[in-house]
Every structure is written in C-alpha cells, then in structure tokens.
Amino acid sequence: MNAKWLKTVFWLVLWVVGLSGISKGDFQGIDDVTQGLPPDASAALEGVLQRLSRRAGYPMSLQQLLQQWRNFVVRVEQGYADSIYEYMNELSVRDLLEEILRSVPHGLQKALAQWITPWDKRFAEATREIGRAMLPAVEQEAPLWWWFRIPKNPGEELEEDLRSEGLLEG
C-alpha cells in the first residue's frame, strides 16, 4: 500500500466515525516534527521517550503523544463527556509533552512548540480557568497552566465530578 492510499483511508474513517472539528490541516506536521533531525536532537528525543516509556511501562512515541493531545483538545471543544479521572489522565499527556520540550535541544523545542502551541490555544479557548489545580501535587510543583482549566462545556458526568471535588460551584 502506498502512503497516499493510506491517508485517503484514514480520512474516510475519520469522516465515517464523525470526528467533526478536525480538519485535514490539523494532522499536517505531526510526522514532519522529527524529519531531518540532527543526530544530537534525535538521540536526545529517543532518550526522553525511552525514559517515559520505562516509567509508563509501555512504549511511547512523540507522534502518539501529539495525536493524543490533539484528539483530547477536539473532544474538549465538542463537550467532554468522560469522568474527571479520564480528563486528568488525558491532561497528563500534556505533562509528557512538556517534559519532552524541556529535555530536547532548542531546535527541536522550537519545532515541537510550533505544533503544540495552536492546540494549546484551542484548549485554552475551550476551557476556563479555575482557582486551584485539579491535582494538589501540581500546585506544589511548577504550575502547569492546563491543570488549572476545565471545559466550558463539560458533559454530565464530568460536571458532577467537578462539583463533588469542589472545582465547580453551583
């Protein structure tokens, strides 16, 4: 199979499952982020991914993490329907991306930031700030802004969870 055919099938599957809110342009650049990296940047990225994979207990790739963040942001934009536990688990993907950003050479940081920043902006637009981090440990460390944000349009289960945790009033 050639790459063009696979992309066509991919877009057809997305259309069939109805992932509205994602345009073809949203997927461009994921594979390009690591194309043509100098050996030192490639080695640094590989080292970080190996460390994260060992810690998680399963293999991770940069493309996988970027796709997970993108997919999560789209779900938040559409109205996040899962529980607070799933929401926090999906937020932790952004933690991993931040760890990668802080661990790789400047040139790769810049390329990654160019891809991540638009998704961060979309996440910020689809959420609202809350007065405390969703995880108390986050407040004790360097504050990561995404832990202080909840969806503007939470689903019923998430809304109930947020109220029971004192993160949503009313």
Image (cartoon, grey):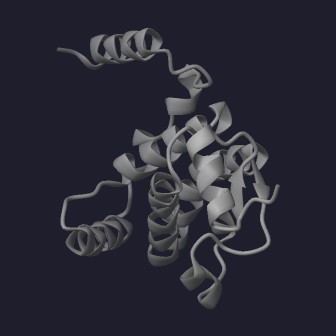
The residue shown at (37%, 63%) is 38
Classify 72 as above or below 56. Answer: above
Q: Position of residue 104 (x, y in %)?
A: 45, 73
Q: Is residue 36 visible?
A: no
Q: Nearer the viewer, residue 55 or 136?
A: 136
Q: Is residue 122 above or below residue 57?
A: above
Residue 166: x and y in percent read: 70, 68
Q: Is residue 45 left or right of residue 71?
A: left
- Total numbered labels placed on residues in the image: 0
| In the rendered image, the vertical position of residue 75 relative to residue 124, given as above or below | above
Q: Quadrant of residue 109?
A: bottom right
Observer-nearest of 49 and 39? 49
Q: Residue furthest bottom?
A: 140
Residue 126 visible in the snapshot: yes
Residue 79 locus on image (x, y percent)? 64, 35
Q: Residue at x 27, y 57 (%)?
A: 60
Q: Residue at x 68, y 48 (%)?
A: 123
Residue in the picture at 47% in, 63% down: 92
Determine the image quadrant of residue 106: bottom right
Of residue 58 and residue 147, the one placed in the foreground of this image is 147
In the rendered image, the vertical position of residue 3 relative to residue 145, given as above or below: above
Image x and y of residue 14, in percent: 43, 17
Residue at the outermost right position = 170
Q: Is residue 127 left or right of residue 9?
A: right
Q: Quadrant of residue 139?
A: bottom right
Q: Horizontally, is 118 left or right of 8 in the view?
A: right
Question: Quadrant of the image for the N terminus?
Answer: top left
For the C terminus, the quadrant is: bottom right
